[in-house]
Amino acid sequence: MFGIGTTELMIILLVALIVIGPKKLPEIAKTLGKAMGEFRRMSNDVKRTIEHEVAQEEKKQTTAQAAKIEAKADKEPETSAESPAASTVEKQEETKDGSK
């Protein structure tokens, strides 16, 4: 726990008992515990918010990339797939005719 050993923790508690007094020590410990719990809750909320925002941004980027890929695929002419086959047929016809 925070790199504090048992002996250091006992010394801290003893000093707190002497400085604060035995009557107020439980009240202060309770207040400190509540404050630590609230801090932990708030930091978890911040962490969840950041993770949510990062996930949303990644989703936007993925959607934008998919849209770019689709747009690029739509711009390419569909005849490009037919071109190699058509040129092969033309070459075969030319060799039969003897023109090349």
Image (cartoon, rainbow, N blue to C red):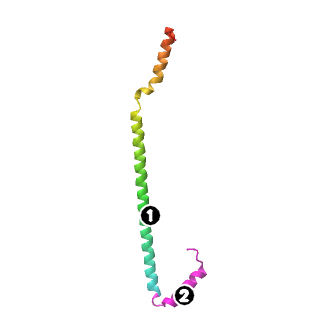
Q: How many marks?
A: 2
Report helix, strand or loop for mark 1. helix
On residue 6, the disc is: none
Mark 2 or mark 1, earlier in chain? 2
* Residue 74 screen position, x and y as percent: 39, 34
User: What residue span does the magenta drawing correspond to?
Assistant: 1-24
Membership of 12 in magenta stretch: yes
Q: Which quadrant does the N terminus fall into?
A: bottom right
Membership of 5 in magenta stretch: yes
Q: How would you rate the neighbour count of disc 1 (Cα within 10 Å): few for under 14, some for 14-19, many for 20 or more?
A: few
Q: In this rendering, would 99 be left or right of 42? A: right
- Report the magenta stretch's main SS: helix
Q: In this rendering, would 8 be left or right of 33? A: right
Identity of the amino acid at label 2? Answer: Val
Q: Which residue is depicted at the point 47% across and 87% down?
A: 25
Residue holding disc 1: 47
Identity of the amino acid at label 1? Answer: Lys
Q: In this view, does 87 lie above or below 62?
A: above
Q: Do the residues labelled 2 and 1 touch (CB within 8 Å)?
A: no
* Residue 62 screen position, x and y as percent: 43, 47
Q: How would you rate the neighbour count of disc 2 (Cα within 10 Å): few for under 14, some for 14-19, many for 20 or more?
A: few
Report helix, strand or loop for mark 2. helix
Q: Which residue is depicted at the point 39% across and 34% down?
A: 75
On residue 15, the disc is: 2
User: Residue 3 occupies which quadrant of the picture?
Assistant: bottom right
Q: Mark 2 and mark 1: span between their CA atoms?
A: 35 Å
Residue placed farthest to the front in the image?
100
19 or 22, nearer to the observer:
19
Q: In this view, does 80 lie above or below 11?
A: above
